[in-house]
Amino acid sequence: MNAVPLLAVTGRFQPFHVDHLELVQWALAHAGRVCIGITNPVGEQRQAHPASAHRHRADANPWDDAQRAALIRAALGAAGVPPQRYDIVPFPLDDPSRWAAVVPAGTPQVVRVFSDWEREKLRRFEAAGYPVVALQGDPDRRVSATDIRAALAGGSPWQHWVPPGARELLAEWTSAAA
């Protein structure tokens, strides 16, 4: 793919982890700027979907928009990404009629596909007229935010799944909550 002015990456980022960072870095290598859309923004009604049974539940969404944006900025900063290379915005994934107000129409959407949920996202973007860049994910190497949340809750190691910057911020929040 040749460099384009803008690519978009969306996700819940609950929390932002090493696979998310890798995906954003891929987009940064292929675009002048990247729009990072945080789905399930606070205040939005979360909707259940058969391809992702947990994405709407409160326990799967412990951090608000501001916290998730802080994790992303911390990870990108630690990775040396200049802030002028990206924007972080709330992204109403369940309301395509509002997407163009957040991400310009026609902006290619980058999605790493592991499961039916990512295939559903691709379908939604294509149906709304957004080009998609589908990257095949390796299920054997997939990092799961669900596993990270469980490890955090259970006191198990989780740090290896979270990039520097975000790792320190999560450790700070976890120790403050204890």
Image (tube, helix red, strand yellow):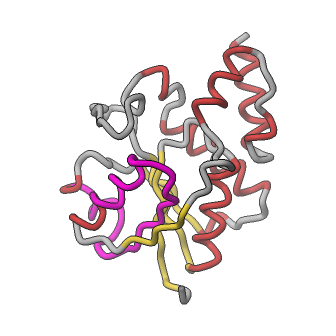
* Displayed quadrant of residue 150: top right
Is 23 above or below relative to 139?
below
Query: What is the quadrant of residue 119 in the picture?
Result: bottom left
Give the percent coordinates (x, y) of residue 52: 38, 37
Q: How many labels does the image show?
A: 0
Front one among 115 and 80: 115
Q: Residue at x 18, y 56 (%)?
A: 97
Residue 145 lies, with reference to residue 33, above or below; the image says: above
Instruction: Say which of 11 and 73 sits in front.
Output: 11
Q: In which quarter of the image is residue 149?
A: top right
Q: Where is residue 142 in the image (x, y as percent from the top left)?
A: 64, 47
Residue 111: where, in percent of width, then height? 47, 61
| Residue farthest left in this picture | 97
Q: Judge whether residue 54 is colored magenta.
A: no
Answer with left or right where residue 148 lies relative to residue 97.
right
Q: Which residue lies furthest to the front in this view?
A: 140
Which residue sits at x=78%, y=20%? 156
Residue 109 colored in magenta in the image: yes
Q: Which residue lies furthest to the top in this view?
A: 178
Q: What range of the chain is rendered magenta?
A: 98-124
Residue in the picture at 64% in, 63% down: 83
What residue is at 70 percent from the left and 24 percent from the top?
A: 173
- Relative to 100, is 163 above or below? above
- Residue situated in front as seen by the camera: 25 or 85: 25
Rendered position, 70 above or below 87: above
